[in-house]
Every structure is written in C-alpha cells, then in structure tokens.
Amino acid sequence: MKMTGRTRGQMLSLDFLLAMAVIILAVGVLLNHYDILTTQGKESRVKSELNTIAQTASQQALEKNADCASDFSTQGYKIYGCTTSNFSSLTKNYLLVPEGFSCYVTLDGGAAANGPGGCESTDAPLDAKDVAVAERKYLSPNTTLSKQDYEKCITGPGCTAYTVKKLRVKIWR
C-alpha cells in the first residue's frame, strides 16, 4: 500500500502534534518539580530560622540567670543549667528575638512570672503558621549546694539537692 502525498502530510502533522504534546507535558512536569523544590527549600529555611531563634533565646535565658550558690565556687567549679530565677529580668532584646517575631516563655508549663519584656503574655495564636519551640530542662537548687551534694548528683540517682524544671521558649511570626 502506497501512501499518497496527502496521507503522508497528515501523518507528519499528527506526529508533530504528538511530539509537541509530549514536550509540553515534560516541560510542565519539570516546572512542577522545580516549584516543589523551591517551596520546600523556602519552608526549610523559615523553619531553620525559627528553630535557631528559639534555641538561642532559651540558651540566653539560662546563661543570664546562672546564679546557683555553692560553697565550692572558689575551687573553679561552675554549675551550668542551674538557676534560682523566675526569669523576670529578661527582655526580648536580650533573648535576641528579632523584630517581626513573637515569643512566649513558660516555666514548668505556666507563664513565666512577670514574663520577659516584649514577649507575649499569651500563647501563640491558633492560626500561626510557623512556630518553633525550644524546651530545656534546668535545675533549681533546694539549698546552697555543697560539693558532696554536687558530686552525688553527678554520679546518679538519689539527688535531693535540685528540683528539675523546664524552660520553654516558643517563637512565631
């Protein structure tokens, strides 16, 4: 069976249309893939930024208030992660929370007494899209700490010199 010129032209036109449809489909798939990667990258950067701000704020809060009294501090010991503070002297600026971000600080599940200046007095709104939380355990001494109690608490259970508490810093836009 021999094709005439007209039939051959119709076949070439159909081939061309199918090829163009496949090319357009491939370009669409590539653009969709690029859009997904771009969106994921942006969301990842935002989440990373929020987590960094929350971690930094919680670290700043504990460093500023590291005030546990001991009878052996002159021997070169420094007790980290220990405070007697209610964190009332902190400010949003000291916590290094930038403008445009909100913060909420809680101690053991309740709002910080006289919460940090500039931070919110209520939790993040329900419609907040990007929220990061940093939770840190810290120790609050029951009495002036002796070296014996300190070493006992390092070695294991049965430590009665401290009460374990939680500092929670929530950051959102």
Image: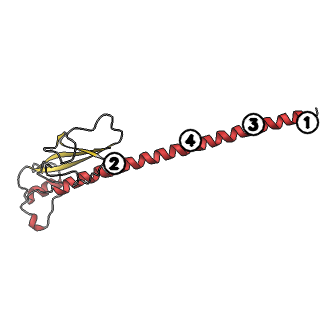
Query: Which x, y percent locates residue 107?
Result: 17, 43
Q: Amino acid at mark 3?
A: Leu
Q: SS for tag 3? A: helix
How crowded pointer 2 is (Cα within 10 Å; few <14, some 14-19, many 20+) is rated as many
Q: Amino acid at mark 2?
A: Leu
According to the image, label 3 marks what residue? Answer: 17
Mark 3 vs mark 1: which is more N-terminal? 1
Q: Residue at x 17, y 52 (%)?
A: 90
Which one is in front, 109 or 53? Answer: 53
Q: Quadrant of residue 127?
A: top left
Quadrant of the snapshot with the C terminus = top left
Discs 4/1, front: 1
Q: Residue at x 53, y 44 (%)?
A: 35
Do the residues under discs 3 and 1 have CB atoms within 8 angstroms? no
Q: Residue at x 37, y 50 (%)?
A: 48
Query: Which x, y percent locates residue 64?
Result: 17, 57
How crowded pointer 3 is (Cα within 10 Å; few <14, some 14-19, many 20+) is rated as few
**In the picture provided, is 141 more to the left or to the right than 37?**
left
According to the image, label 1 marks what residue? Answer: 5
Q: Amino acid at mark 4?
A: Asn
Which one is in front, 125 or 76? Answer: 125
How crowded pointer 1 is (Cα within 10 Å; few <14, some 14-19, many 20+) is rated as few
Q: Which mark is residue 162?
A: none
Q: SS for tag 1? A: helix
According to the image, label 2 marks what residue? Answer: 50
Which one is in front, 48 or 128? Answer: 128
Mark 4 vs mark 2: which is more N-terminal? 4
According to the image, label 4 marks what residue? Answer: 32
Q: Distance from label 4 to label 1 (Cα)?
A: 41 Å
Q: Residue at x 56, y 43 (%)?
A: 33
Mark 4 vs mark 3: which is more N-terminal? 3
Q: Distance from label 4 to label 3 (Cα)?
A: 22 Å
